[in-house]
Amino acid sequence: MSIPDPDPAAVAAFWDRARAAISVAEPELSLPDAPPQAWGFGATPAHADALLALVLTGTKTGTSSDARGYPATGEPVPVAGQLDVVLDGSGAPRAVILNTSIDTVPFDDVDAAHARAEGEGDRSLAHWRDVHERFFTEHAEHDQGFSPSMPVITERFRLLYP
C-alpha cells in the first residue's frame, strides 16, 4: 500500500500557513506563492509516518534515493535550495523542509555521517546499508536491480515548519 496522493487544496492551505510562519522566522528566505512539491518518505504509509516522526524530532536531517529511479518516474532530481512539503502516511501535509546539500555517490561510498543524518535504527552505516539495500531492491522504480556501485542521491535538509 502506497502513500495516498495529497489533496491539492489541503496542501495549498498548509503552504499558506507554513509560508506565513517561515516568512516571520526566516525573512531572508524567498518563498514562492505556489506550494512546492509534496511527498512522503518511504514507500508505505507506515514508513512515511515513522520517518516523518524522526524529521519532526530533529533526528532525521538526511535522506537518500536511488538516482536511477528519477528517469524511470519522470520526477525531478532534487537540488540544493529546494523546498518540499512532507506528507504523513495518510497523504496529509505535515512539514516543510529545505534541501541544504545534494550529492550523488555510489551506494558503497555513502558514509557514516550521512547514515547518522538519516536517523534510522541505531544510526550506523551498517544499519543504513542493510535497510537501504533491501529498500532499493524491494521498491525499485526501474528494472536495473541493486548494485553496490549504483548511484545514490544523498540529501541533507533542515526542517523549516511546523
Image (cartoon, rainbow, N blue to C red):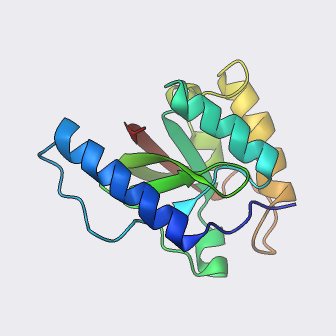
Residue farthest to the left, as pictured: 28
What x and y, as percent, mark residue 86?
Answer: 54, 51
Q: Quick check: 9 left or right of 50?
A: left
Residue 161 in which image quadrant: top left
What x and y, as percent, mark residue 81?
Answer: 29, 55
Question: Where the N terminus falls, by quadrant?
Answer: bottom right
Q: In the rendered image of this protein, does residue 53 appear above or below residue 79?
A: above
Q: In the rendered image of this protein, does residue 81 appear above or below residue 59?
A: below
Q: Residue at x 64, y 50 (%)?
A: 41
What x and y, as percent, mark residue 60?
Answer: 55, 31
Residue farthest to the top, as pictured: 122
Question: Where the C terminus falls, by quadrant?
Answer: top left
Q: Quick check: 91 left or right of 139?
A: left
Residue 82 in which image quadrant: bottom left
| Closer to us: 153 or 26 | 26
Q: Residue at x 11, y 46 (%)?
A: 28
Question: Is residue 128 in view from this perspective?
Answer: yes
Q: In the rendered image of this protein, does residue 93 appear above or below residue 127?
A: below
